[in-house]
Image (tube, helix red, strand yellow):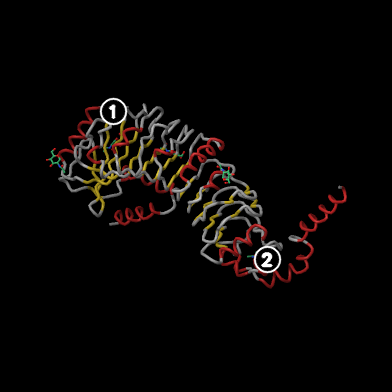
Amino acid sequence: MLRLVLGLLILIGAECHETVLSLQMAREIPEERLGLACPVELDYSPQCICDFWPYETYNVYCNASSAEELNVITQTFQRTPIVKHTEVKISLTESMSIPANFFSNKTAVSIIFECIGDSGKLGLIDPQAFILTAATTTAFGINFCDLTEFDFAFLAQLRVLASLRLYNTTMTTLAKMPFMPHMRTVELFGLTGLREWHDPAQTPFLDTITINAAIDTDQETMEKILETLLYYANSLRRLYLPNLGLIKVPPAVRNLTYLNTLDLSANLISSLPTGSLALSSTLDSLWLGNMLIQSVEPGAFQGNFRPTLVYMVFNRLISFPRETYEDILEEMIYSSGSFNIYGNPITCNDCHLDWLINEKRYLLARVTDGMCTNGTSFDQLDAQVYKARCAKDNHATSIQTPFLLLISMLTFHRLLL
Ligand SMILES: *[C@@H]1O[C@H](CO)[C@@H](O)[C@H](O)[C@H]1NC(C)=O
Ligand SMILES: *[C@@H]1O[C@H](CO)[C@@H](O)[C@H](O)[C@H]1NC(C)=O
Ligand SMILES: *[C@@H]1O[C@H](CO)[C@@H](O)[C@H](O)[C@H]1NC(C)=O
Ligand SMILES: *[C@@H]1O[C@H](CO)[C@@H](O)[C@H](O)[C@H]1NC(C)=O
Ligand SMILES: *[C@@H]1O[C@H](CO)[C@@H](O)[C@H](O)[C@H]1NC(C)=O
């Protein structure tokens, strides 16, 4: 029972934003056997085990280290009565080719291959290998394989394929992609050697792209890849780019007009200069958590952020300046937008928060988990204390000083001319 509940929780969890988590779950299920053992009459041995979940969900995990063992797997699918499987995962210890009609006439919603041997190469996959599951298979995945020179042409047989996932593969190119008009989601996790995208016209209707932890892809290469993704400006809804070592926001994301989710979390971005998030899309969520963000210049956020959850948790923000946030917070009042700034070392014993705590306290409703370094949350800060403390400061410091300085510099400049 506990396992069952746990399993359901994980299923639900996988729906959530936590991409990394769901990816790891997907990988770990076979080892952990989170489902229940299948009824005894469903014997998939010796090459496979069957894993049973509620709602007639059968997953099958197989091993093969030779062509003979692959053949045994095909015979196993032939003799077992279950026609519709949810996930079938084949772990290969040697590089070998996958023959036609590999699952006999049985089907799988999701097919995963992984290379667990030393060679790491995945051989040729027959263009008819999955032809009898072609109307059912919507997801295909490859884990831990060396895909250098790999030809994805076989995917053309999967005519309703909507999702392609590659985890911890080595590859330099995704170039050899067939035309796949049903494809919606491409998920790349822990890739080595990612240098370019495939011709986007081969998968013209992508709505979700994840590139998580591309181990040796630098900022410039990633920016080029994202420029290729501009092909999807009118279809791409969700773009997840965590753990890529990005040091600045790639410019192309600003031109993706149709996005509703942008995830840049866990990169190495330390500042958001003016215009860096001048987006042409109206996001529901913008993930900027777990980075080194210290400075957010005025005008860093431009565009429509009214409904946007801006998630800036666990950064290095020490202030929350009016010049950067006031206008956006005022806009957010019209919809559901907010900034979550949990886990930032914000100082509260000066006057920089006076505008928020004292003058425009109603905007606090749009600042989630704002907290001072001493542990006091923003909404516990006393407006009167700020009023008293900052009354005389207000005129002398903060907002006015730079402005006066600017005026005097301009005047000085004019005098020079
Ligand atoms: C596949 O091989 C691995 C490693 O040898 C082993 O741990 C696992 O139990 C095998 N799975 C099946 C279904 O035989
Ligand atoms: C699958 O093939 C077997 C023979 O190999 C046949 O008896 C069975 O009816 C077929 N099932 C379907 C769903 O086509
Ligand atoms: C897969 O890649 C991720 C990201 O680089 C890494 O943390 C993880 O250890 C890799 N897993 C395996 C089994 O290689
Ligand atoms: C984004 O759009 C702007 C304005 O339309 C254009 O100047 C810029 O070159 C575009 N950027 C990219 C990376 O295509
Ligand atoms: C934290 O600092 C704020 C601002 O100086 C102050 O109002 C509050 O009482 C402090 N909280 C604690 C627990 O010291």
Return the x and y of residue 209 as percentages of the image width and height.
Answer: 44, 45
- Tell me the amino acid under the disc marked 2: Trp
Determine the residue positioned at 87% across, 51% down. 415
Residue 353 drawn above or below residue 183: below
Q: Is residue 66 left or right of residue 190?
A: left
Q: Nearer the viewer, residue 381 or 327?
A: 327
Q: Nearer the viewer, residue 160 or 119?
A: 160
Return the x and y of residue 347 as percentages of the image width and height.
Answer: 66, 59
Q: Is residue 27 left or right of residue 286?
A: left
Q: Earlier in the sequence, mark 2 or mark 1?
A: 1
Distance between mark 2 and mark 1 Cα atoms: 67 Å
* Dot label at residue 287: none
Q: Quadrant holding ligand 2?
A: top left
Q: Is mark 1 within 8 Å of ligand 1?
A: no
Mark 2: few, some, or many residues within 10 Å (few <14, many ≥20)?
many
Q: Is residue 204 left or right of residue 70?
A: right
Q: Secondary structure at mark 2?
A: helix
* Dot label at residue 355: 2
Mark 1 = which residue? 97
Residue 207 drawn above or below residue 69: below
Q: Residue furthest right?
A: 415
- Residues at badges 2 and 1 in contact (C-beta under 8 Å)? no
